[in-house]
Image (cartoon, helix red, strand yellow):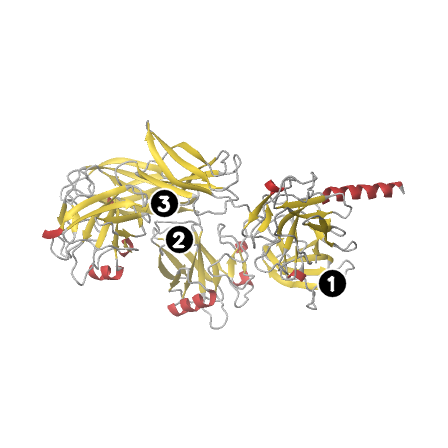
Amino acid sequence: MRKSYISFLFILFITTLNSQNVVINEVLYDPEGSDGGYEWIELYNNSDSAVNLAGWRFEKAGSEFETVFIFDPIGWFPIEPNAYFLIGEEFVPNCDLIENLAFQNGGTATDGIRLISADTLYTDTVLYDSPNTNNLPDDVSNPGLYFAVDVAGGNSLARVQNGVDSDNCELDFFECSDPTPGEPNFYPIDLAIYELELTLNNDEYWLQTEVFNLSTQNVDNLTASLEITVNSSSYGSYYLPAIPALGSVAFTQQISLPAMEYCVVEAEVIFLYDNELGNNFAATSILLDENPILINEMLFKPESSNQEWIEIYNRSACAYVVDNLQIMDASGGIISFNGSLQSNSFLVICQDANLLFQTYSNCDQNLVVEAIDWTSLNNTEETLILMDEFGTVFDSLSYNGNNCPANYSFERVNPFNDENIQWLVCIDSCGGTPTFHNSVLPIEKDLKLEFIEIYEENSKINHKLKISNIGLENIESAEINCYQREVDDISNMNVYSDFIELVDTLEISFHTDLPGSGYFEFQYEIISDEDLNAANDQQISHFNNGGLPFVINEIMYAPQNDMPEWIELKFNSNIENLEEYFLVVDEDTLQITNPEGEFDFMIITHSQSDIDTLQAFYGLDEIPMVKGLVSLSNSGEQLALFDNCHNLIESFFFSPEWNDAIPGTSIERINSNLPATENNWGPSVEMCTPGTENSIFVEVLPSNMKLSVDPNPFSPYRNEYTIFSFKLPQVISRVTLRIFDLKGRMLRKLVNQQLQASTGNIVWDGKGDNGKKLPVGVYVVLMEATSYETEKVYNKKITVVIGK
């Protein structure tokens, strides 16, 4: 008897402690229009345990407190830990409980709302409006001393911090213009940054800005930060000191900039509770050396069949995205555009790309973009300024076009020399040289580098190159360099360097050490200070030493009726300079030109009609598709992949036994980074997965079966679902998942002997096999998985709770 009494007291003590964490969190006592049916009050449980509100009551006060309603003392009204409980009138949606409230509002004196626990040992009181002429008490003073504001119609009274009660209504509550019944409150804090300044002081660059607090609440020390990026790469994160309400703090930071001609520095204010993100960002730019990009050619006086256009040129060793550049004329008109500009390359901006291609048929279409905005160029006097969005000027020029014939461009004579800049009329027969070196460029000396072959010889790599003098005058000596990098590595390693003597044309051969396992890119470069054209001074080759940069990933050799055969390639690496590769099926070879852009998969099928069928059926509009695949034998084929340097990537014979010869089911590779052995293939558990990750893909199998459920508990009576997530120690298994009650009666069979990959999810709506929602309670979930390959059986049992 004594033990039972002590246990009762302990439970009562714990319940009382938890009750003290239930607070009035938000209340709407004055809805817009008529109050009737639209008032609501939200409670929050700031403890780690659920609290039953049975027997609790609400009181309201004008002149004195009186009861609004009492929770049924023998009822069950749980408020979960760190959760909300919403009580509202009849027209309030998503309420946990519907009651008539009619809280006090209006008048010229303090009103109040009070929550009282069932044992009356705990109260939470909210007093609002003033003065307190009726001497209403709060939780610590009688009469109360601190009052929340009397909110306008339609606004709620909300806690500044959810669940945090200091017994000071003036500090604890604010007027919320965007009420959040049943959800967290957000105090409207707005941090802003407007300008970013970058200055040079004693050979050091300093970043300066000011962060403003536009709200009426202080921001605590180290709760907000500035994220700094340089050329789109993260530079650092810096915590800010406390920022007073309606105040600001200055930020100054020394910053190291990369060895590039042009840098963009960006700053973003990060604060979890910032409700206005549109003013959290500022940026600036700076030229650290000579301008890398300049205006190189322009056509300002076209005939009626042509159009105006401007060419810009990147004379630096770095590539640039030029989305933030623009060209402004003397009147302030803007030409804006998007694009990228590779090292020593061009970009032509025009209004109609197709018209430009028709007019200049030899131009490189990859180096042409259509302007977003265009301003007409003057045929006589004009000034053009190439600048970025921050006002940093890259280049400027002024011209007088009176002596320029129609349909002929103006060309910059030498884009590599900023002294004595000259512009001349184009002398090319087309009247312009868009995407090419200017016709007036005096290329007196020019070396051209060509790749011949690469192969392994005596555990070394042999490289063969050709160097030609193609300029007006010969260059007699130059430096040859060879750089090696693995394709997924951004850093180059110089593996060969030599000085060579030249006359006219020279073929050279040299050896480098055989690298370790992997797929490697070799970049060759010929260097001479006398060479005026760097565009033809580099070549690329590749060498494979057991790497798998791209592989055959999925094979559909026996499709369903009216569907085509296909092979899927997967690219494990982004090989930027790979121009083409070859798929060999038995004795037939298909040459594949590498598409532009980044992609992970490619589908190869027979014809354009088959491409259209696959795109329509599987939604593969974003996946590169190639035609030319020969018919695949249902008894298997020898397959091989080569790159354009004749490196073998992989070669294997696929067998129909790899997918049990199931019609309409593809053979999938388990892991694209592992060799194409029999153990690395299996049947798709989703029939096929063209253009997406294979259904049986796995990197590392777990040692044991794992099964979890989330959310738990859940309520089908609130149209909620739960998800069973599993991990299996086999690549493919036959899975059965059943639901039982605590008496062992099976109520639902969700999955029955279904093929599943090593990881997956199963959704349950809380219903039994009869289609009805199961009662509130605890249920047993049993999952059985039988290995597709070994027939070993795995079991896992967990419980799931259905709530109200």
Q: Quadrant of residue 508?
A: top left
Please say if 295 is above or below 498. below
State the residue in front, 387 or 339.
387
Q: In this orientation, does residue 615 appear?
A: yes
Q: CA distance from mark 2 to mark 3?
A: 18 Å
Q: Earlier in the sequence, mark 1 or mark 2?
A: 2
Q: Which residue is disc 2 drawn over?
A: 598
Q: Earlier in the sequence, mark 2 or mark 3?
A: 3
The crowd level at tag 2 (other Cα within 10 Å; few <14, some 14-19, many 20+) is few
Tell me the kind of residue under disc 2: Glu
Q: Quadrant of residue 170?
A: top right
Q: Secondary structure at mark 1?
A: strand
Q: Secondary structure at mark 3?
A: strand
Q: Is residue 184 left or right of residue 277?
A: right
Q: CA distance from mark 3 to mark 1?
A: 60 Å
Quarter of the image for the C terminus: give it.
bottom right
Q: Which residue is disc 3 drawn over?
A: 521
Residue 454 in picture, x, y percent from top left = 33, 46
The crowd level at tag 3 (other Cα within 10 Å; few <14, some 14-19, many 20+) is many
Quarter of the image for the N terminus: give it.
top right
- Number of callouts: 3
Q: Is residue 141 left or right of residue 246?
A: right
Residue 746's tag is: 1
- Name, please, the residue furthest toward the left: 403
Q: Is residue 744 left or right of residue 757?
A: right
